[in-house]
Amino acid sequence: MDAIDLKILAVLQKRPDLSTPEIAERVGLSATPCWRRLKRLTEDKVIAGKAVLLNAKALDLTVNVFAEIRLKQHDEATLEALERAVRGRPEIMECFSVSGDSDYLIRTVTRSIEAYEIFLKKVLLHLPGVAAVNSRFALGCVKMTTALPI
């Protein structure tokens, strides 16, 4: 990957809706070489995909909860079962395996604290191997981005 590839990626992160000729113009290439680079970056999985970002507030999904999950056991089967279950839950926006006192950190979005309480009781506490869940409610969002620092 060279400086031109990084320029292409930076443009795409800011404006994923641009056409290949528009991207080419912004990075100083003609359309065909830019198209080839985009194709290679996609084939190499540097470009993982494109997405439409929705306004959570407009959809009344304003409660962000960070939940630390501690497991009863740490065998491979339990870890894989929990991760598989988490991937199947649309309310879970992000899930990270972490070091420290917890095993996983997840971020969920819900419409209300009451809705989260139901999700906690009906889903999170029943995920495979869960021993405890410690929830923290976000008071506000200072920064949220999908752009990587390239």
Image: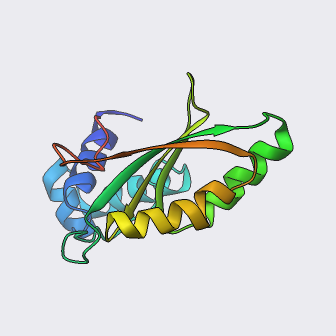
Whether residue 91 is visible, yes or no, is: no
User: Which residue is at 71% across, 57% downward?
Assistant: 84
Nearer to me, 127 or 22: 127
Q: Looking at the image, which residue sits at the far bottom? A: 59
> Which of the 4 image quarters holds residue 63?
bottom left
Q: Is residue 27 left or right of residue 138?
A: left
Q: In the image, is residue 8 above or below residue 3?
A: below
Q: Is residue 106 left or right of residue 21?
A: right
Give residue 138's position: percent from left, percent from top.
Answer: 27, 47
Q: Give the quadrant of the C terminus.
A: top left
Q: Is residue 121 left or right of residue 13?
A: right
- The figure's colour scheme reads rainbow
Q: In the image, is residue 23 above or below residue 99?
A: below
Give residue 131's position: percent from left, percent from top.
Answer: 68, 42
> Which of the 4 image quarters holds residue 110?
bottom left
Give residue 120's position: percent from left, percent from top.
Answer: 53, 59
User: Which residue is at 20% across, 48% downward?
Assistant: 139
Whether residue 58 is visible, yes or no, is: yes
Nearer to me, 143 or 71: 71
Nearer to me, 82 or 111: 111
Give residue 50's position: percent from left, percent from top.
Answer: 38, 65
